[in-house]
Amino acid sequence: MRINLALAALILAFAAPRAHALDMGDALLKAWEKKDAIVKTTKALRKGFQELSDEEEYYIGRAVAARILTDYKTVADPARTEYLNTVGQTLALYSTRPATFAGYHFRIIASAEVNAFAAPGGFIFVTTGLLAQVKSEDQLAAVLAHEIAHVTLKHGLGAIKSANLTQAFTILGTEAVKEYSSADLSALTTAFEGVINDVVNQLVVNGYSRTQEYDADQEAVRIAYKAGYNPSGLAEFLGSLAALTSGDSKGLGFYKTHPPANERKGKVESLIAKKKLEGAPSQARDARFQARFM
Amino acid sequence: MKRTYTALVILLMAAALAWAAGKVTVIHKKASLRADKQFFAPTLAEIPYQESLEALETQNGWIKVSYAGKTGWIHSSAVSGAAPSGEKKGGGLSIFGDDEKKGAVAQEDVALAGKGFNEQVEKQYKQKNPNMNFAAVDEMEKITIPGDKLAAFVKQGGLEAREYAN
């Protein structure tokens, strides 16, 4: 009896702020049912690229990056590489995805083309040709923020054809396994190859849609502004690009498949005016940029 | 009978309390445990992938946890699971606005851990495509700038975090 009284006191101590102990039991039952619903959701066959996990995005990104780095040589310049990563990793913190599965990493690749690639998961590449057109840290930040935006908006993953995803998701089924049978692994790897081809074709061959580029520009302005950079950096860079494209577009690579630079510049300037975004160049930032790139 | 019922209620309540506290699981390769609720704060420890932690409190997208005898903050984008109730919103300017992912969600990421396109699939892909330059990707992944270096860079460049009204 004494034990029962002690138990009753314990129950009251726990349940008093809420309600009767029986109500608590009901609440727990409801919570348990909710938990079951969550488990059922995760066991349903996945349908779209939005349902890829951060880890899967990372493995796709690694393979896409490996393809890019098979075609392009990296530039072994530790000072510039560290600077690029410092600017890029700072900006990423102000994006909607401050962390990916293994973080954001930036590399300079040797190519005269004015070009940049953002592989899923945060593997970002800029060419020496593009860097030659960048005149300040604020402009560099704008370019990197644009590429980060492609990652956060999952534009690369969006290029995966549904047939390849459906094939993979069907093999994966609904059971969590750590090791696949050789037949499943072989089929899954074939689907994986299809996925990588889809993303590489989008990044390197076809480029993104106009809408995706405008969306990435808009997000780039937001990221750069939040980080404290001059939001006009993107408009300035696009101005330089417009001057290039007005002549021979040879050597512009991927950027010639983007929407016209002048149109993008106009949209960026409208956004800055509409949002009343202020900013100014900085001598400290200009000095450290020039020390590495001029 | 009465005693059994009481014991059952106690057990259920203990489970309910554990539920309310909230567990989170690391869904990234590693999650930095930071001394304060910001990325530029010193790192106390690196928490490995799939580690399950008790969420003690959430504020502005950061979750307070204890790991390896140290208590600090991890960012919610690095974990999945139930956030504890009663999230407090801190005052002042946070570099993470209201549009950021808060409190941890994506229960699916826990269920999918190690599943799908994983290391095993990459290994097979490498065997089929031996020319792919994964070594350069491994090198690229090593480039990480420590938080204190980022903080010094931000300060030296006069970069002040600002809110952006959507």
Image (cartoon, rainbow, N blue to C red):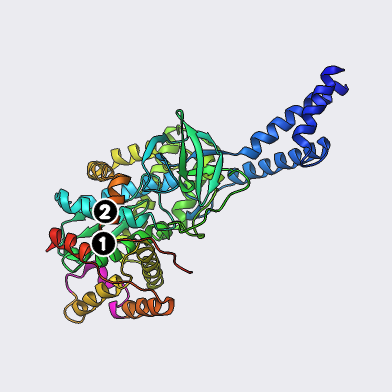
- Which residue appears farthest toward the left when viewing the image? A294
Q: Is residue A61 above or below residue B64?
A: below
- Whole-percent x, y for residue B100 in the image: 49, 56
Magenta stretch in the rendered image? A250-262
Instruction: Report the side of B85 relative to A231 (left or right).
Output: right
Chain letter of the residue beneath label 2 in the structure image: B
- Whole-percent x, y for residue A123 in the image: 31, 52
Rounded to the nearest angstrom, the CA distance separating label 1 from label 2 is 24 Å
* Amino acid type, residue under disc 2 in the picture: Phe
Q: From the viewer's side, name the closer residue of B86 and A167.
A: B86
Q: From the viewer's side, name the closer residue of A293 and A250.
A: A293
Residue B108: tell me if it is visible.
Answer: yes
Query: According to the image, label 2 marks what residue?
Result: B153
Instruction: Report the side of A98 relative to A238 (left or right).
Output: right
- Whole-percent x, y for residue B107 in the image: 56, 44
Count every numbered label the image shows and give the total: 2
Residue drawn at x 28%, y 65% is A143
**Mark 2: few, some, or many residues within 10 Å (few <14, many ≥20)?**
some
- Which residue appears farthest toward the top when viewing the image? A2
Secondary structure beneath dot 1 equals strand
Query: According to the image, label 1 marks what residue?
Result: A116
Secondary structure beneath dot 2 equals helix
Q: Work out which quarter of the rendered image holds the C terminus of chain A and state it.
A: bottom left
Instruction: Report the side of A45 relative to A93 (left or right).
Output: right
Q: Does the magenta run of residues contain A257?
A: yes
Residue drawn at x 55%, y 39% is B55
